Image (tube, rainbow, N blue to C red):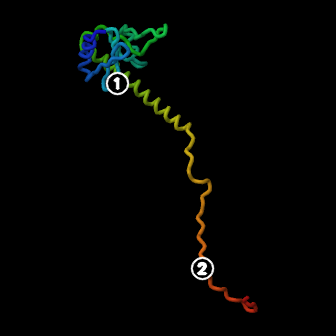
């Protein structure tokens, strides 16, 4: 892969913000604010897509990113950037925005799924055992060995 092509892609995204490229799986991931919204593989730029913007890429005649894994064809939700958008930053800007929006939606779904999974895990846990005995214990009052006053005798009875 050409380092010059990756530099060119970063220039194309210049008006969009501070973009970074990181090596991954023989290509580069393209990030804005820590979120990957594009990738470069074999000197080709692919942009993030989802059910909301997929039709835009299909109508522009863009092909989906695919590779062979263990003898089978695998695809990712990234589409080749339109040829005309590769000519200038101004033409690339709307495509970058739609790809970043798809990345934001995917990230939000992951966060919600993670929260649901954490809640399910907590719900499955047994409540913690308490250190307290099942019946509350009462402290017995200490008996005082003090002399009690004698009870008055009733008439007709003798004290022994």
* Foreground pick, 28 / 58: 28
Which residue is at 32% across, 21% downward? 31
Left-right relation of 106 to 152? left
Residue shown at the point (56%, 43%) measured from the top left: 127
Instruction: Look at discs 1 and 2 and give the one toward the viewer.
Output: 2
In this picture, is 126 found above or below 45? below
With respect to residue 110, does 40 lie above or below? above
> Can residue 20 be seen in this snapshot?
yes
Q: Name the residue at 66% across, 86% down.
A: 151
Q: Residues within 10 Å of mark 1 (few under 14, many from 20)?
A: some
Q: Which of the labelled discs sits on residue 35, or is there none?
A: 1
Foreground pick, 79 / 156: 156
Q: What is the secondary structure assignment of the residue under circle 1?
A: strand
Mark 2, other Cα within 10 Å: few <14 / some 14–19 / many ≥20: few
Report x, y in % for residue 47: 35, 15
Cα separation between marks 1 and 2: 81 Å
Residue that label 2 marks:
146
Secondary structure under tag 2 reads loop
Where residue 147 appears, x then y in whole percent?
61, 82
| Quadrant holding the N terminus | top left
Residue drawn at x 36%, y 17% as measured from the top left:
24
> Can residue 56 be seen in the rendering of this structure?
no
Image location (x, y in percent) of residue 59 = 38, 10
Does label 1 or label 2 sit earlier along the sequence? 1
Q: Could you tell whether 69 is left or right of 47 in the image?
A: right
* Quarter of image, res 77: top left
């Amino acid at each position: 892969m050409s380092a010059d092509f990756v530099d060119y892609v970063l220039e194309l995204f210049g008006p969009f913000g501070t973009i970074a490229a990181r090596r991954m799986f023989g290509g580069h991931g393209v990030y804005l604010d820590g979120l990957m919204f594009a990738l470069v593989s074999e000197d080709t730029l692919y942009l993030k897509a989802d059910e909301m913007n997929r039709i835009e890429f299909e109508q522009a005649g863009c092909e989906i990113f695919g590779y062979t894994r263990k003898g089978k064809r695998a695809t990712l939700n990234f589409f080749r950037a339109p040829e005309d958008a590769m000519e200038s930053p101004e033409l690339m800007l709307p495509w970058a925005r739609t790809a970043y929006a798809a990345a934001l939606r995917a990230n939000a779904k992951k966060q919600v799924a993670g929260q649901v999974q954490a809640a399910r895990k907590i719900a499955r846990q047994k409540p913690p055992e308490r250190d307290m005995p099942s019946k509350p214990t009462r402290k017995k009052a200490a008996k005082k060995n003090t002399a009690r006053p004698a009870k008055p005798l009733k008439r007709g009875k003798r004290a022994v």
